[in-house]
Amino acid sequence: MRYALPPLGIAVTTLLLCSCVGPTGTPPDTRKVYTAADARPDFSDRRTALVPDAIPPGVHVRYAKTDQVIRCARRLAESLVDDELDIYADTVLVQPGAWRVVQGLRPIGDAESRELKLLTPGVSLEEMTESALIGRVLRSEADKTALAQSIESLLREAGPYQVRTLTAAEMTKWWQYTGAEIAEPVFVVASHSGTYAFVFAFDADDRIHVVDELRALPDLD
């Protein structure tokens, strides 16, 4: 791995890695699933970009320990400029939003991959065939390399970006399509131009296992 990052990477990584003071209140319980009705844990040991937004009504969130969040944010920032393929899990779910923007940029979807169908919110099972949102489950190194290179290229073309947590509005939108708890570490890589908002969700081994792109998901409001 190279550590000589270009100016953008340095700026993003510095933002994420500056030391913080320790928590002064009750830290998050990593075993608990939080909702809007729960008391907000203390996140004073995190930098602003890594402090979770308030949980919107109806959304369920599971927080991770701060050291894991910082570690994964650093790895993500570095991987976006350094082609660190090891950051991806053995199986990666490319959700429909991300698949819409990367499909066709490079050959992705070999014999080891399979189609992922996501039921559009508010649509019955009988109508799913016509309205299902399509993603991809990737397993091969070649596919994951193509995915990483495609995302890196799109972000580079869109200009400066930031690695941060999801906003309340982003949690609400993503929740409508995932239907499962939003579990940290999870980040948005948002281009300042507003072109892209890629979601990267990490597993317990600090590896990316879900990728999505919020701008490409239909608005349901």
Image (tube, rainbow, N blue to C red):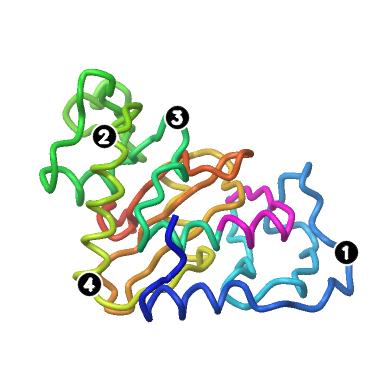
**For the residue carrying disc 4, how many other residues have a C-alpha within 10 Å: few (<14), some (14-19), or many (20+)?**
some
Q: Secondary structure at mark 3?
A: strand
Q: Amino acid at mark 1?
A: Thr
Contact? badges 1 and 4 (CB < 8 Å): no
Residue at 36 percent across and 40 percent down: it is: 121
Judged from the image, the secondary structure of the residue bearing numbered disc 2 is helix
Q: What span is in magenta?
A: 59-72
Q: Is residue 59 above or below residue 25?
A: above
What secondary structure is found at the residue carrying circle 1? loop
Q: Name the quadrant of the N terminus.
A: bottom left
* Left or right, 60 with reference to 3: right
Reading the image, the residue beneath label 3 is: 90
Left or right of 178 in this view: 50:
right
Residue 172: mark in rendering: none
Q: Amino acid at mark 2?
A: Asp
Could you tell me which residue is drawn at 29 percent across and 60 percent down?
A: 215
Residue bearing the label numbered 4: 158
- Residue, disc 1: 26
Which residue in the protein does label 2 denote? 143
Marks 3 and 2 sit apart, C-alpha to C-alpha, by 11 Å
